[in-house]
Image (cartoon, rainbow, N blue to C red):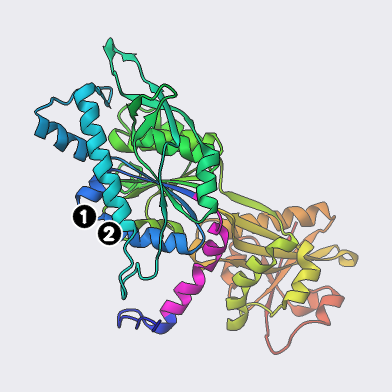
Amino acid sequence: MKPVALPPSRPVPEFVHWFRSVAPYVNAFRGRTFVVAFGGEVVADGKFIELTHDFNLLASLGIRLVLVHGARPQIEARMKERGAVDRYVRGLRVTDELALQCVKEAVGRMRVEIEALLSTGLPNSPMANAQIRVASGNFVIAKPVGVIDGVDLLHTGQVRRVDAEAISARLDRGEVVLLSPLGFSPTGEVFNLAMEDVATATAIALRAEKLIFLGDAPGVQVDGELLRELTAGDAEALLKKPGRIVGEVRDHLEDAVRACREGVGRAHLISRHVDGAILLELFTHEGIGTMVTAGSIEALRGATIDDIGGVLKLIEPLEAEGVLVKRGRELLEREIDRFVVAEHDAMIVGCAALYPFPEDKAGELACLAVHPDYQNRGYGDALLKMVETRARRAGLKQLFVLTTRTAHWFLERGFVEKDVNALPRRRQALYNLQRRSKVFAKRL
């Protein structure tokens, strides 16, 4: 296949930098299960064609995909054609016999249309050679909701159990699983289900890495500000504030919290109106929506041998600029126990090292680096504090650092400029006269 020419708006170096930057995500996501939920509005608005391109890309990267679709606008249209009246109780449709027939017809048409779009493979298109195999079936076992506020919801149901084993078997065969908002009972009844309930229960049953909701809003917003990250605890606190989070966003956020509390790695709330929204959320540092996690996704800890690749990726650009002294992988492997790292959502975003000189009761702070996308978030200060704590525990009384570019940063944090002769003798012998690094020290 002939490579596609780059558009003039994306210079080659920028494209290469971007392509390399997504590699950690590709490696992290391969073989993981993602459950993506979207309403019938996506298909009704004609936006599903672009979405299939993104699903194809995710599948080609080895991501195990479960797609859960809704069908509310299609059901409502079918009900209108039949002259039926929509009735809702607490946001749930009252599904009588006529409504159930409309649900079956609307969902059946939706599923066929979605499967057709996922089956396209036109040359010179994002779906070329896709060959997506779609699996669907009676994977969701349901039960009736029953009576709410004195109203019998009849054929409206809720998820009783998801056949995770059967879905996993299809995913293992490289198929994309498509689930509709219908459930079946052991007695052969059919129930109309909420798309969100199906998606959340499926993500929990599969222990999915991600549950993604595509909705009308860009995510969770408070006073006009988009909240990029929330722990389940923070989300619960927001939900308890009357009138703060309402409508579809509230429903999705409640399901996101439930999913994270019950073993799903991450839940995302993103806009269905942004082309490529899933890719922007998953493969960029900032994302474009709201990510919900069970607990904090930030961690400061001692480095391990498994962190070497992440540390090298972080410091190599600074070594190339001459900001840091060059270290090879072999040296880093030998000295990795001297390093501490800052981790954000399983990605190394900062590092620092402590080299002790016990005979002088001093230690050198070295290789302090923070990823450009995560600067000005306090990671540098946190790493410095952690190194200082390590130094005190080792009985050191002074911390010094050699730098060529960041003198003011250290001065603002209590370091004082010193002469090279103030360094421990063993460190003076290693001083690089060509770099002419400035020396700063701080009493501990």
Identify the magenta region: 14-33
Residue extending farthest to the top is 150
* SS type, badge 1: loop
Q: Classify residue 307 by image quadrant.
A: bottom right
**Which labelled disc corresponds to residue 49?**
2
Residue extending farthest to the bottom is 434
Dominant secondary structure of the magenta stretch?
helix
**22 in magenta:** yes
Q: Going 34% across and 62% down the picture, which residue do you hit?
A: 53
Residue 442 seen in render: no
Amino acid on which disc 2 is placed: Ile
Q: Quadrant of the N terminus?
A: bottom left
Q: Position of residue 442 (x, y in %)?
A: 71, 62
User: In this picture, is 427 found above or below 25?
Assistant: below
Q: Position of residue 346 (x, y in %)?
A: 59, 55
Q: Is residue 70 left or right of residue 237?
A: left
Q: Is residue 419 left or right of residue 290?
A: right
**Which labelled disc corresponds to residue 46?**
1
Instruction: Between residue 420 and residue 84, name the one nearer to us.
Output: 84
Mark 1 neighbour class, 10 Å CA radius: few under 14, some 14 to 19, many 20 or more:
few
